[in-house]
Amino acid sequence: MEKQWLGPKVCDFCRESVVGKKFIDGKTTLGPWALMCVECSREYGTGLGTGRGQLYGPDGKKISG
């Protein structure tokens, strides 16, 4: 079954919409998990993979992680 993001569509850090953009649902350097735009994930994210984060495409479908 293909994974698709159904949650909020706004970056938890910069509050910008991620609709139509790649985004990450992942663990942050601050501790909790967050929905992040690609730019904020570079600063606050811990990477992709099991226990770290998942990358979703502009269509909300999971790409990796």
Image (cartoon, grey):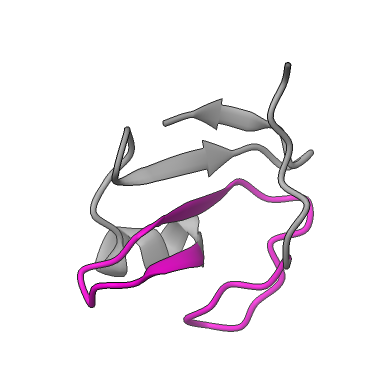
8 versus 53 height, above or below: below
Relative to the observer, which residue lies in front, 1 or 61? Answer: 1
Magenta stretch, main secondary structure class: loop
Residue 9, percent across and down? 73, 65
Question: Which quarter shows the N terminus?
Answer: top right
Q: Position of residue 24 (x, y in %)?
A: 50, 51
- Identify which residue is drawn at 32% across, 33% down: 49
- Which residue, as the protein is rendered here, is positioned at the far top? 1
Q: Is residue 20 magenta?
A: yes
In percent of the image, x 32 and y 34: which residue is there? 50
Q: Residue at x 79, y 38 (%)?
A: 59
In the image, taking residue 5 as reference, residue 62 lies left or right, namely left
Q: Which residues are magenta?
A: 9-35
Q: Residue at x 38, y 45 (%)?
A: 53
Instruction: Name the side, left or right, on which 14 lies relative to 50.
Output: right
Q: Where is residue 21 drawn, in percent x and y?
A: 68, 50
Between 3 and 40, the one lying in front of the other is 3
Instruction: Decide whether residue 17 is among the magenta residues.
Output: yes
Relative to the observer, which residue lies in front, 59 or 30?
Answer: 30
| Labels in figure, total | 0
Position of residue 60 in the picture relative to residue 42 (left or right): right
